[in-house]
Image (cartoon, helix red, strand yellow):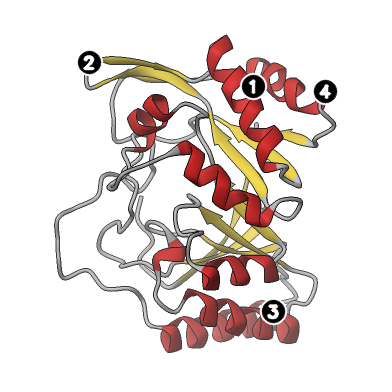
Amino acid sequence: MLFNEPVFGPIHSRRLGISLGINLLPAESKLCNFNCIYCECGWNTKDKKKKFNRRNDIKKHLELKLKLLKDEKQYPDSITFSGNGEPTMHPEFSAIIDDTITLRNQYAPAAKISVLSNATMLANPDVVTALLKIDNAILKLDSGIDETAVLINKPQFSYSIDKIIENMQKLKKHMILQTMFLRGIYDGKQIDNTTKSEINAWIDAIKKIEPRKIMIYSIDRKTPADNLQKVNFDELDKIAEHARKLGYEALVAK
């Protein structure tokens, strides 16, 4: 499921309502420093010619779409950076956020600006500054245990939960923590981030990160890896209750 345009939708999001999407990544294939086994965009490819969408093209397409929606009195709840990979990898991410804030204020002032990110680029101070300017910095942490996170997310670099948490702390009280819960078998290994030890590690991570809100969900579409299983709503809600007992707002996507 790839997005062929720099600006797409609006679509109905389980977490964000009526969402106008922005894709900073190539149209023809995914570009990400993760290769998650559940990603709706499929696997990364080895095409070295892949290019980010240009800042000016993003700005032009977004303004045209927002003008059209305003004329039709169809206002989005969220302008959401997601698309075919990790948006914060774009070299002009910070400037694009500034463009988006300006256009949002002009055409759809009630809309939130949201970014769905794997939190791997938070060592870049420009990315942190940009995320602090928006309404919903939604950052992924699918496990509090390195081995499990590597199995689920397949990072394309040396990955450390401790380092990710340390960088997330730059956004504490501002960011939203997002976690995908699932079970299955991949590469001959059992995966289950709903076990007692996994939940304990996840809760420990939450205590360190101190997010503004928590969103949890499970598989909703076809996944590139076979043999993955969805976790049902009731079980997800029980997991969310652990965070609620700590005083956090924890939402479960149906």
Q: Is residue 253 visible?
A: no
Disc 3 and disc 2: Cα gap in Å? 47 Å
> Which of the 4 image quarters holds residue 105?
bottom right
- Measured from the top left, where is residue 241 in percent x and y? 76, 21
Which one is earlier in the sequence, the residue at label 3 or at label 1? 3
Against 59, residue 237 (above or below) is above
Disc 2 and disc 1: Cα gap in Å? 25 Å
Q: Which residue is mark 4?
A: 245
> Which of the 4 image quarters holds residue 15?
top right
Which one is earlier in the sequence, the residue at label 4 or at label 3? 3
Q: Which residue is mark 1?
A: 236
Which one is earlier in the sequence, the residue at label 4 or at label 1? 1
Which one is earlier in the sequence, the residue at label 4 or at label 2? 2
- Measured from the top left, where is residue 59 in percent x and y? 51, 85
Give, as a three-letter code, the residue at label 2: Gly
Q: Residue at x 71, y 25 (%)?
A: 240
Q: Secondary structure at mark 3?
A: helix
Front disc: 4 or 2: 4
Q: Which residue is mark 2?
A: 188
Give, as a three-letter code, the residue at label 4: Lys
Which one is earlier in the sequence, the residue at label 2 or at label 1? 2
